[in-house]
Amino acid sequence: MITIENYINGELIPPSNNRYLDNYNPSEGKVYGKIPDSNEKDIAKAYSAAEKAFPIWSSSSVEFRSKILQRIADLILENLEDLALAESKDNGKPLSLATAVDIPRASSNFSFFAKAITQFSSESHENNSINTINFTLRQPLGVVGCISPWNLPLYLFTWKIAPALAAGNCVVAKPSEVTPYTAYLLAKICMEAGLPKGVLNIVHGLGASCGNAIVEHTNIKAISFTGGTKTGEHIARTAAPMFKKLSLELGGKNPNIIFSDCNYDKMLQVTIKSSFANQGQICLCGSRIFVEDKIYDQFKNDFLEKVKQLKVGNPLDKQTDLGALVSKEHLEKVDSYVKKAVEEGGVLLHGGKRIQIENFPEGYFYQPTVIEVESNNCTLNQQEVFGPVVSLMKFSTEEEAIQLANGTKYGLSASVWTSNIDRSMRLSQQLKTGIVWVNTWLNRDLRTPFGGTKSSGVGREGGLEALRFFTEPKNVCIQYSPE
Ligand code: NAD
């Protein structure tokens, strides 16, 4: 049994109430660890540690902060195997995915912002006619809160923490209570890397108590949150009267738009990934597949053939394509969406059932599922399932494809498959999403702005956007004497 502790003021300590929650291994469906059930007392403790650390950390040189962040990045890579195994065990994702993507990206998040902060600059505006210069001071905010979800645990946790620390803030952070393990291991890495005490505090617990206490804390100046749209709404309501700065990365119902003139083989290969990578539990998965009518039947056949070849199984097995869903509750939610889709007239083309895997009778495994729908207004096309479930629907014109793609409350990302550059530009302009991928998917350059429109969120992360979010711009206006 692994017992996780909070990381506060540079030490690993138990929660103030000494209460712990169960942590499940989703592929076994069994409890394998305990995590602190922290509350507002622990958040208050974490805040005071961060507040105390802030004057020194924020006034330390950029080179010093950069060096420590780079050391953390290096240690993550040195511990790649252990971290990937921990992530796979905690989340149910294939070990191969955690090894190739999650953990290397967590390291890159730190190394990227270790470098980015050394290049961060601000504007100045000179007006010679009145002997004035305005320049923008970019100062750290103080103590900030970072709250992350379970689907890409260490990847998304570090995507927030790294820019916050690089910019000179101190942090109170909470990983998802469903996947806390790698955040705990990160605390140990920060201790080894010599991160000064109190600069980063990692508090574990439930969203309603521990997470909410971060948002409600009057002196925590900003909240960077990634998670569900409903939780985002609650956070926005709580934070608004305190005028906190907010970055909200929320849900998606992303369109994958396929035109007949695309590079078909590449599209098919990538569409399998964009549908089912990480068991479809990526906010950027293309869960609504729209196919031009000319190639619809061909696509349906070829896609189903490939889906049938996907192997659902032991996350530690190298051949596994899909591991377990993250929890029993989530599996039941996914299954209920599939049932509802069929009730509403959707045609189940493949999957739609929980599966039992040899030696893992209690694991939360679910078949990759494909449902053909006739209307974009069905629940399946309007609500986020966040599992291995995609819908197929045909369209006949470019205008119709745009209308269908924009016809949800979400606006995170879209993929467009076409070899017509003019069309790709028209769609890029008209799709109401924060990200458009043309002839690719999940192709990420950390310098680019990342985030959604509509109910998919507010604000942008990534590159300079993240450093801007975690700093307060202050305009300084100096009038000088010309003599
Ligand atoms: P969630 O909203 O349930 O939880 C996210 C985090 O918020 C967890 O740490 C949770 O404990 C915490 N939380 C819950 N209630 C809270 C409250 N009242 N106050 C403060 N914190 C609270 O989301 P989830 O189920 O962990 O993650 C899945 C969701 O995340 C999906 O909707 C997915 O689309 C979204 N997501 C979005 C992005 C993006 O970049 N836009 C990336 C990944 C996941």
Image (spheres, rainbow, N blue to C red):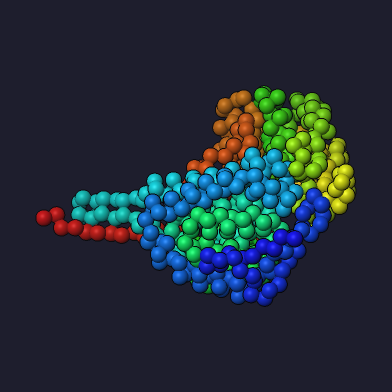
**Camera-nearest residue between 450 and 97:** 97
Is residue 482 in view from this perspective? Answer: yes
The vertical placement of 35 against 343, above or below, is below
Q: Quarter holding the C terminus? A: bottom left
**Camera-nearest residue between 399 and 40:** 40
Q: Quarter holding the N terminus? A: bottom right
Q: Position of residue 232 (x, y in %)?
A: 63, 60
The vertical placement of 3 against 362, above or below, is below
Q: Position of residue 180 (x, y in %)?
A: 67, 58
Residue furthest to the left in view is 483
**Camera-nearest residue between 271 and 404:** 271
Q: How many marks?
A: 0
Q: What residue lies at 58% left-to-right and 58% top-to-bottom?
A: 188
Is residue 339 in view from this perspective? Answer: no
Q: Position of residue 376 (x, y in %)?
A: 75, 43
Q: What residue lies at 67% left-to-right and 56% top-to-bottom?
A: 181
Q: Position of residue 446 (x, y in %)?
A: 52, 43
**Would you say 397 lies left or right of 118 here?**
right
Q: What residue lies at 44% left-to-right and 45% top-to-bottom?
A: 115
Q: What residue lies at 64% left-to-right and 65% top-to-bottom?
A: 5
